[in-house]
Image (cartoon, rainbow, N blue to C red):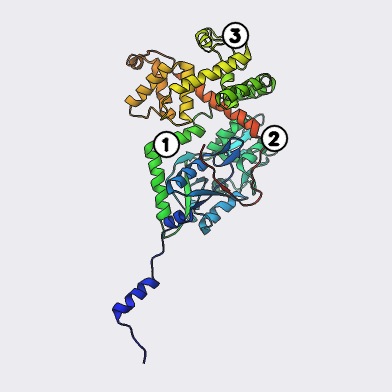
Amino acid sequence: MTKRFPLLLALPLILASCSIPDSLLNRVKESGELRVVTRYNPTTFYRGKSGTRGLEYELVTLFARELGVKPVFVLPKSFDQILPMIARGDVHFGAAGLTATPGREHLVRFTPSYQSVTQQLVYREGTKKPETITDTLGGTFEVVAGRSHIERLQELKQEHPELEWTEKRGIRSDELLSLVVEQIVDYTICNSSEVALSRRFHPELKVAFDLSGPLPVAWAFPHAEDDSLYEAALSFLDNLKQSGELKRIIDRYYGYVESLGALDTRTFRTHILQRLPKYSEHFKQAALETGLDWRLLAAIGYQESHWEPAAVSPTGVAGIMMLTKAAAKDLGIKSRTNPEESILGGSRYILLVREKIPDRIPEPDRLWMALAGYNIGFGHLEDARILTERHGDDPDKWVDVKKYLPLLSQKRYYETVKHGKARGKEPVDYVDNIRSYYDLLVWENNRQEVPVASSTSQLTSPALF
């Protein structure tokens, strides 16, 4: 005869055998690691002598910090491995500059967009500009395998059956753009953010036309019943938007990239070869004394004088760092046209201005404001910060302050602040140009570096700089 347990006695055993598993979010926190697939690209994740950078890198690192875990970035060999890795659950999610398209949504689950891009057909300057997609016929037309660009091309092929292209595996979009520059490939498609960043270093790249309207860029998660990590990501991204921090981070990467034209970029690169070698040791010596990056100091010097030691402006400022007579006297500079004295004096003066900026303002915003103050005067910078606060924006964020500096040239605004009228657009352009020159100098230093990605690689993120 089978022995039966009374129901009340059996219930604990049933509950124990059907215990609810811990949520994915808790399991991530307990493991101490957040595994994220990304791709090596200037718009997402890249490593240079200055450390690891990239929009996705920074966003993921901030999210991991909020969760109290360490981010582990997984870099597959080929782009077309990214979505399958997410769908299989090999990683917790993907942050790779992915556009959310209907064709992808059956594979993965996207967060709301945090950026938008357009797809652009790219060719090289000096070759015939394609006016329509069919003008690519007869040329070498290559695209990265697995990207949403393929979906768009397949749509266009319905209208133009003769359309042809080659899908390339194991190549990055920036590498493909370099092949266009070298005229090995005639045409490719890239997202507008990638093109904008690449054109700073390769002004020969030209956009023929847009192949799409604005497309949302988002993180991608596996389809799963456990929404805990996904919901945490939604909350994180929403808070980042509401606080204005997302806008500030995006500005750090894209807010200045079109400040230089193709001619400016070519001229600068020529001067790097012809003029900079005469003064680079002076910039490096000033960097040792001030703690500022020598390439930043060189970028400032170029913006000021194009590295011309005898330069004199109509207002009387002179030398590589364009010092006033009063500033030179205060800094103990005997000759403003002496390159070594000018560079060291200008570098010291930048520190003096930065010390006036409130300590609570984080870098790099504090540096951008110091440079704006160096250019227009600290008093006018403070007036712009007052206008920023009056209009409900954040006076401690450069992305907000730069909107209000130009208002100092308008009577209805400058009459309401202490230091009066100023050419407020100039410091905005000044800072944007310096940021672009700095990036070009860093790129010249790092251009020989290649990523560790011959096979699927895992990289643990260092602390944010």
Residue ID for mark 3: 335
Q: Is residue 308 visible?
A: no
Dot 3 or dot 1: first in sequence order is 1
Number of labels in the image equals 3
Q: How much space separates mark 3 and mark 1, taking CA atoms?
A: 43 Å
Disc on res. 245? 1
* 217 or 369: nearer the viewer: 369
Disc 3 secondary structure class: loop
User: Where 181 sits versus 153, above or below?
Assistant: above
Residue 133, above or below 320: below
Residue 8, x across and y down, in percent: 29, 78
> How far apart are the two marked residues, 2 and 1, measured between alpha carbons?
38 Å
398 and 256: which one is in front? 398
Q: Position of residue 99 (x, y in %)?
A: 50, 45
Indicate the amino acid at tag 1: Glu
Answer whether labels 3 and 2 touch (C-beta < 8 Å): no
Q: Which residue is mark 2?
A: 182
